[in-house]
Each structure stands twice: as structure tokens, then as C-alpha cells.
Image: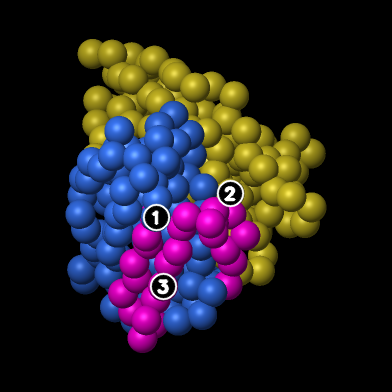
Chain colours: A blue, B yellow
Amino acid sequence: EAGVAQSPRYKIIEKRQSVAFWCNPISGHATLYWYQQILGQGPKLLIQFQNNGVVDDSQLPKDRFSAERLKGVDSTLKIQPAKLEDSAVYLCASSLDKVPSNEQFFGPGTRLTVL
Amino acid sequence: AQSVTQPDIHITVSEGASLELRCNYSYGATPYLFWYVQSPGQGLQLLLKYFSGDTLVQGIKGFEAEFKRSQSSFNLRKPSVHWSDAAEYFCAVGAAAGNKLTFGGGTRVLVKP
């Protein structure tokens, strides 16, 4: 079974530029998550989708971050404009459903460096 | 609000020695608790989880964890560490509704030969 795919793996941009990350979850997984992991910290949930609807985006900085999950499969996370403090690894995860007994499977992440 | 504290940022252990990683949580109801491992350049991999029942849970790679409600702790242990266990370990608590995970800050484990 293929795992969660993310691209690109690495991205370097200058502040005020825009950037987009892509995630392809495990086939059949209804729930998709985007986490931000700043160096030296644990991952922090940015947004959670159930199919193509948003379950939780309470920690998403909506003035600069946006995410969508069209057709309830792939998802993109966008930052516009980027700030220095957005430098982090962005992890995508998916689970069969949004109950706690469903394991979240994580992708390898996209490492973003903002100069 | 739920929170997780991992008091040890770094731990160095000799290969073959035992390992214990501490985790303390704050959650208003019965917690769903997880331990994940993250190797360099890799995503997070689930080691074990606790939802209910036996407070000593077994996981993959020879790890186990014990849930102690009175101490709000969920410490991870391994009797004999291998060099391949060098990684960062994260404890997390899950919400009953929505499966949102809140992670601790992580503990980096270094294994000496």
C-alpha cells in the first residue's frame, strides 16, 4: 500500500513570495491533516479535512495560509506572502476517518526555508 | 485545552542499555495517548497507542509504555536500545472528537556505541 505522498520535499523562497505544497493521502482515507513542525518543536495541527470539508482550522493563520481539498482526495497548502517564521517542515497526514482509533499516517514532509 | 510535556529534550544512552522517555499530559477527559518516532528526513511513525484497558501497552520495535492516570503520565520504555533507535520521539494526546493530535516538544535520543 502506497503511503502519503508530498511534494516538493524541499523549497527555498524569499520572504513575501508565495509557495504551495501538495499532498496525496493514502487511497480511501477520508481525513487529511496538515501540520507545521518548526525546528526543535513538535508538529502543530494547521488544518483538518473530512473528505472535502474543513473540520478544524483554528490554528491556521488565515491572513496568509490557505488550504483546499478539492474532490476529497489531494490537498494543497499555500502560503502567501511567506514570512521568515514560516520556515518549518510541513507534514501531511491521513487517516481512514476522524475517530481517535484511526491511526494517522504521515508523509515525509516538505521542508520550507524562507530567506 | 489539551497539552503534552516532554521534560527531556535530549537523552544519550549506551547501546544495550535501557531507555525511558517521559511524557506528561493535560486533558479533561479520558485521554487517547500516542508515541511516535521520527528518524532524520522521515515522517512520523506510530510506535504505540493507548485508548483504554490494560495500562501497559506494547508497541513495535520492542517499545512499551505505561499509562498512569494518577500521575498524568505515559512514559515510553525499551529494555535494550539498538543503534537504530537513535531518533526523535514524540508523545501526543488525541481529542475524543475529531482525532486532533497535540504533540509534545519531542525528545532526541542519541545512542552511544
Q: Position of residue B112 (x, y in %)?
A: 28, 13
* Callout 2 touching callout 1 (CB < 8 Å): no
CA–CA distance in space, label 1 to label 3: 14 Å
Q: Is residue A85 magenta?
A: no
Element on which disc 1 rests: loop
Residue B67 visible somewhere in the drawing: yes
Please state which amino acid type lies under the numbered disc 2: Thr
Q: Is residue A72 magenta?
A: yes
Q: Pick the residue in front: A95 or B72.
A: A95
Please state which amino acid type lies under the numbered disc 1: Gln
Q: Position of residue A2 (x, y in %)?
A: 20, 68
Tell me the quarter of the picture where residue A76 sits.
Answer: bottom left
Q: Which residue is mark 1?
A: A80
Please state which amino acid type lies under the numbered disc 3: Glu
Q: Which residue is mark 3?
A: A68
Q: Position of residue B16 (x, y in %)?
A: 32, 20
Q: Position of residue B64 (x, y in %)?
A: 48, 41
Q: Are marks 2 and 3 on the same chain?
A: no
Chain on which label 1 sits: A
Q: Pick the residue in front: B19 or A25.
A: A25
Kindly identify the residue that appears in the image at 59 percent across and 54 percent down. Answer: A59
What residue range appears in magenta?
A55-79
